Amino acid sequence: MSEHRRIAVVVNGTPYEAEVETRKYLAEFLREDLSLVGTHIGCEHGVCGTCTVLMNGVSVRSCLVLAVQANGAEVMTVEGLATDGQMHPLQEAFREKQGLQCGYCTPGMLVRAYELLEENPEPTAEWVREGLANNLCRCTGYQYIVEAVLAAAERLRGSSVAEGQPFEPATSSRTNQEA
Amino acid sequence: MKPAPFNYHAPSTTEEAVGLLAELGSQGRILAGGQSLFQLMNFRVVKPENLIDINPVSELDYIRVDDGTLAIGARTRQSALERSTEAARHSPLIVEAVKNVAHPSVRNRGTVGGSVAYADPASELPAVVLTSGGEVVLTGADGQRTLSAGDFFRGPYTNACSPDELLTEVRLPRWPDGTGHAFLEFQRKHGSYALVGTAVLVHLDGESIDRVAISLCGVDQTPVRASRAEDLVRGNVPSDGLFEEAAAEATSDLHPLPDVKGSAAYRLKLARVYVRRALELAVSRAKGERP
């Protein structure tokens, strides 16, 4: 018993059609069938968030969504962030602020951060920290990731609020233990 | 690929879904948000031969008030419940509770009906349905029946649904205006499973409590209603001493399972603290002292 279905899905603006086994997850489909290997697979059961992608505009764990369930959907992966070879301000900020070390969680972090800034372009550090608790990082302690997201938010808003950002340095003891 | 192979069915109406259940019997399994079922399938704890995916059943995606009852369609995403102003007006308790379910990306897929039907004894939504005096609607090929929450949760991950029935709606009666609510739980880290959770509703008549409901999750085989603690509180004027007594009573006959995250004794101690705090918070909200 190995059932296949034909699906049509738009990924990062490009339409694809493919024949997939019904038990194949979206994350595996993206990587194996579309060669979009930016989406990483971590825990494979919905805990770590490394495989986070946007499906019809909201973040999902692509290891807990079947490829057949994405039939007819619009998906955005980390590869959808850059435009015309130009990195997205979030990606720039992650590089500048060193919001990554090993880089394994980064695709999920970036996609989740993108969703957070779509929801609230003027976030506080606390809000970003809580929002990123959705995703695990085992290297950075999150501090530089939070700083990168705040820096990107500032850049995306333009220079109108350059000073007086809700940018809180790590002063409390809980900052490294949140997520 | 991690799950064992299965046949995939994607009905677009409740009728089709129930028809498939009737046809497949115990060979069929309902797939709702998949945030728990896929975990079990990935570890091959379960190997359903047929998955009946109700995600396309959009007629089960609704939040509405019927006759003073908040009716939530089984396929409603947890994230939609979290953002629903209608739900917040009618049952702020369930909205407060659902924010404790895992993380936003999980709630974007996870459904209200799936969470209630899964009947995880540590889960938030079953405890809320029990506290509110809620009901579930089960739909089968032969029609519908409505069960109280107390009759629905039978044991760990076990509910009263027959193999040919689909949970289609969760119903929460409205508590009177001025009711105070509180959902509190202890998680080892943000968004992880609760060691202990507690849901409280309180209504005051003048100085004294005239209606109260207290439930706990994570401390026994099912979510538990603390009826004797409710009896102790009802008719009395709230005080620190009363909350302390009620918390002791609520946790006097529970049987939490120990695991790597905490011993049974630790969970009982936590439960006692959380019931007291939830009572305090719900009463202060009923008095309008806290938002």
Image (spheres, coloured by chain):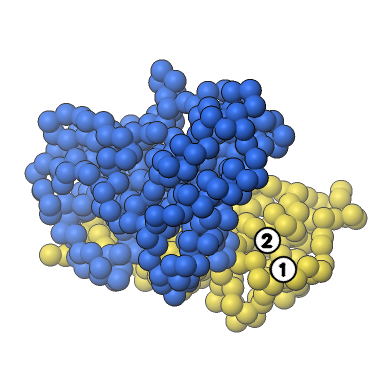
Q: Earlier in the sequence, mark 2 or mark 1?
A: 2
What is the display colour for chain A? yellow
Q: Any mark on residue B223, and which?
A: none
x%, y% of residue A49? Answer: 51, 65
Q: Which of B82 and B68 is in front in this view?
A: B68
Subunit ID for the residue under disc 1: A
Residue at image location 60% in from the left, 81% down from the top: A102
x%, y% of residue A11? Answer: 46, 56
Q: Mark 2 points at which residue?
A: A129
Question: Quick check: A122 above or below A78?
Answer: above
Give the class, few, some or many, for how many residues have Cα within 10 Å of label 1's Cα (few <14, many ≥20).
some
Chain letter matching colour blue: B
Q: Which of A147 and B214 is in front in this view?
A: B214
x%, y% of residue B185? Answer: 54, 54
Q: Mark 1 points at which residue?
A: A175
Residue at image location 34% in from the left, 52% down from the top: B222
Of helix, strand and loop, which one carries label 1? loop
Decide if residue B234 is in sight here.
Answer: yes
Residue at image location 32% in from the left, 40% down from the top: B150
Which quadrant of the view contains residue A80? bottom right
Q: In this view, does B23 lie to the left or right of B85?
A: left
Location of the C terminus of chain B by quadrant is: top right
Of helix, strand and loop, which one carries label 2? helix
Q: Are marks 2 and 1 in contact (CB under 8 Å)?
A: yes
Question: Quick check: B256 above or below A176?
Answer: above
| Amino acid on which the number 1 mark rests in the picture | Thr
For marks 2 and 1, give the CA distance: 9 Å
Subunit ID for the residue under disc 2: A
Q: Is residue B11 left or right of residue B193?
A: left
Question: Quick check: B221 above or below A100?
Answer: above
Q: Nearer the viewer, residue B74 or B146?
A: B146
